[in-house]
Amino acid sequence: MPSRREYDERDIRVRPNPKGSRPRTKDRPAHKDAVIGFVTTVDRGRWTVLVDDHVVHAMRARELGRTSIVVGDRVGLVGDTSGAEGSLARIVRVEKRTSVLRRTADDTDPVERMLVANADQLVIVTALADPEPRPRMVDRCLVAAYDAGMDPLLVLTKSDLKDPADFLGSYAPLDVRHIVTSVSDDGIDGVEQVRAALNGRLSVLVGHSGVGKSTLVNELVPGTYRATGHVNAVTGRGRHTSSSAVALPLPDGGWVIDTPGVRSFGLAHVDPGRIAALFPDLAPGTKDCPRGCTHDEPECGLDAWVADGHAGTAGPSRLESLRRLLRSRSGDTDRGDSDRGNTE
């Protein structure tokens, strides 16, 4: 019986490198010649980008991986940037952002959803009736605006159905800018005030479905034809019409970004320790709180602050809104915020 042969290094065959091959490198091209454009829409892995005076369709370069690219972003493009039919450029980088508007599905979801980049104004559109206004949704949007460093603007629609005084009284201590509108036979009363507030700025509109957001956009940007919906008589909720965000140029300068209707803003991305500071009418009262106060405990200094009238007549409801948000943010679903629903 033949003996078993011992193997040594001579039995290992080494394949030579193919001619002309180069070792891999982590260095990436700088793309110094990339053309800068402005993202106006996103649709199923394709981005519409405005470059100078023409539109370019683009895809994300492989080197960007899963980098988020959203409406409002300024991006670098290479490849065919002519905008000719059938052409497709590549987005190779995202320029530094000045602001980012984010939300999460709910207050305990760790996954952030980036909505819009580089906007400097958040326009919170809410109806005074049909559907009924949801102050806690407005509070969440205000927190999101302050957290992103954006200026908030309240636009109240359908004032022909209900007087806005009571609703505005809740936000009087904040001194939040507001515009009241209504629909008439001649269009939208108050639309010129809205137009002036948006002029020269990059503004993003948010609001529940059915509050008149798309109707307002159609009036601000003639020829847009954004789909409008109706309010369900049983649920009191609007029908979802817009499916994606889109940036539209205003006739007198500036941009308005229309977003799909939402049920609420999840704020899991906001540090719970900062939330009280994002309620400007209540924040001064926290100076009397004990160290480590959660602002939802018997020793909280905010109770005395509100009882003394420092936060105005709306103080108790505003404090309850803060505490509901804090409970929801901490995952206390038994006492949490009822306006935690997902985007429709």
Image: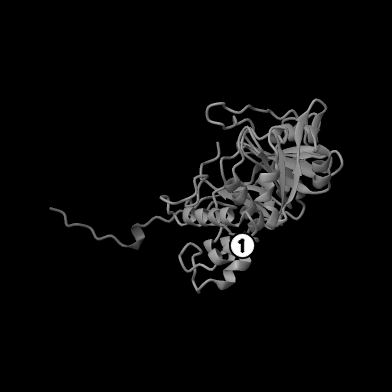
Can you identify the residue that label 1 sits on? 282
Q: Is residue 58 among what the camera can see?
A: no
Question: In the figure, 15 relative to 277: above or below?
Answer: above
State the residue lying farthest toward the left: 1
From the viewer's side, name the closer residue of 226 and 30.
Answer: 226
Q: In the image shown, does 39 or 164 lie closer to the viewer? A: 164
Percent coordinates x, y for residue 191 in the rendering: 80, 37
Q: Is residue 333 visible?
A: yes
Relative to the observer, which residue lies in front, 96 or 136?
136
The residue at 68%/28% (across/down) is 227
Q: Image point 58% across, 62% down: which residue?
A: 306
Q: Secondary structure at mark 1?
A: loop
Q: Residue furthest bottom?
A: 291
Q: Is residue 249 left or right of residue 260?
A: right
| Left or right: residue 250 compared with residue 29 | right
Q: Is residue 16 left or right of residue 206?
A: left
The structure residue drawn at horizontal position 62% and vertical position 62%, both measured from the top left corner, is 309
Viewport quadrant of the C terminus: top right
Looking at the picture, the colour scheme in use is one colour
Residue 12, compared with residue 255, is above or below; it is: below
Question: x%, y% of residue 217?
Answer: 75, 35
Residue type, mark 1 in image: Leu
Circle 1 packing at 10 Å, graded few (<14), some (14-19), many (20+), is many
Q: Position of residue 229 (x, y in %)?
A: 64, 27
Q: Residue farthest to the right?
A: 252
Whole-percent x, y for residue 263 in the image = 56, 40
Q: Is residue 188 above or below residue 201?
A: above
